[in-house]
Image (cartoon, helix red, strand yellow):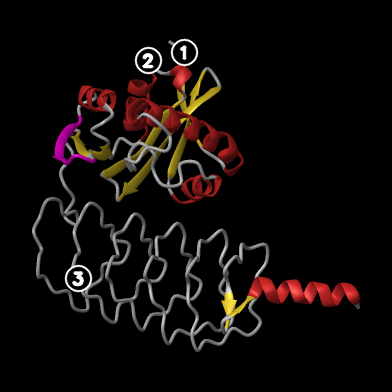
Amino acid sequence: MAQITLLRARLEDADQLTAMMKGTFDVEALHWLGSLDSHIVDYNIQPPGYDSIHTTRYMIEELTYYKIMADRQLVGGIILTLTGSRFGRIDRIFIDPSYQGQGFGSEVIRLVEREHPSVTTWDLETSPRQKGNLYFYEKMGFERTFETEDEVCYIKRIKTETTTAENEFESCNLEGATYYQANLANSAFSNSTLAGAHFSNINLSSSKFQNINFRDTLIADLNLSGSRVKHVEMSGVAFSDTTIEGAPVSFERCELMGTRFNNCKLGDVEINDCDISGMKIDGVSVEELLEVYRMVKKKG
């Protein structure tokens, strides 16, 4: 077998990694769903943004992204989310179809565990339709913890002589707990439920929220200056009584179809290189306005 190594991905690798991920997951979709446009939506087979270079760039910048190399040849990638020192999640792993079936996947899992020896709990999710994945992960020591018709959740615990640190809490029930004047700076929360939690008068500066379900959440009276919002599903979100002062807010590669701006101050707003089909201002078609403007300018 070729020598397998892991190298941290860099932004200049984004094009090649995106193309390889898309090719790999498209082959999986054809095999397990029957087509690339199947009526079945399976985000474990075709995860959100798997074909987007911008998603790849985000993952390289914000997550732990390794290139899988076989004798210096790029053959795939593996993306991890690390929580604290002992908990890790395998978000995605892909190996180019032409290199599959050679034991590369097993070696990659071993290399990841060796690269992060302090991580003693690994978890992941996969599709129950991908029978080969189920066999592979169970062969690598992962155990099923939860399954539905859409996903199977796995966990792997690595036994070590290291004792749990005093400030690490795992599989504990703290429902209904109240924290007042508590110092939880630099804490990490993963695979936990905070549904119904109430945060008030809290300093969350420099925090990270990734892969979070915020449905039906009230977010009010916040200072978000300097924050970044990436790869967020915001259908049905309403902004009211919100002020943008100082540095302007920018939207790039966003889908804002059907968005409504009512009684808002939009002075100095710029719209460049955007699809404005159907866009209206006070009921007037922007496309028609621009067409008239161009005609007048051409005659002038």
Disc 2: which residue: 101
**Mark 3, secondary structure of its residue:** loop
Q: Amino acid at mark 2?
A: Gly
The answer to which quarter of the image holds residue 216 is: bottom left
Q: Which circle, 3 or 2, is nearer the viewer?
A: 2
User: In which quadrant will I find the C terminus?
Assistant: bottom right
Disc 3: which residue: 197
Q: Is residue 1 left or right of residue 212?
A: right
The residue positioned 39% from the left and 42% from the top of the image is 47
Q: Amino acid at mark 3?
A: Ala
The residue positioned 28% from the left and 71% from the top of the image is 217
Q: Which circle, 2 or 1, is nearer the viewer?
A: 2
Boundaries of the magenta span: 142-150
Where is residue 158 shown, x and y percent of the image?
20, 33
Where is residue 150 shown, x and y percent of the image?
23, 41
Q: Is residue 156 above or below residue 274?
A: above
Disc 1: which residue: 2
Q: Is residue 272 above or below residue 100?
A: below
Q: Is residue 237 left or right of residue 85?
A: right
Q: Which circle, 1 or 3, is nearer the viewer?
A: 3
**Mark 1, secondary structure of its residue:** loop
- Does the magenta segment cover residue 283? no
The one of 264 and 104 positioned closer to us in this rendering = 264
Q: Is residue 113 left or right of residue 121?
A: right
Q: Is residue 126 above or below residue 223?
A: above
- Does the magenta segment cover residue 145? yes
Mark 1 to mark 3 CA distance (whole Å):
50 Å
**Mark 2, secondary structure of its residue:** loop
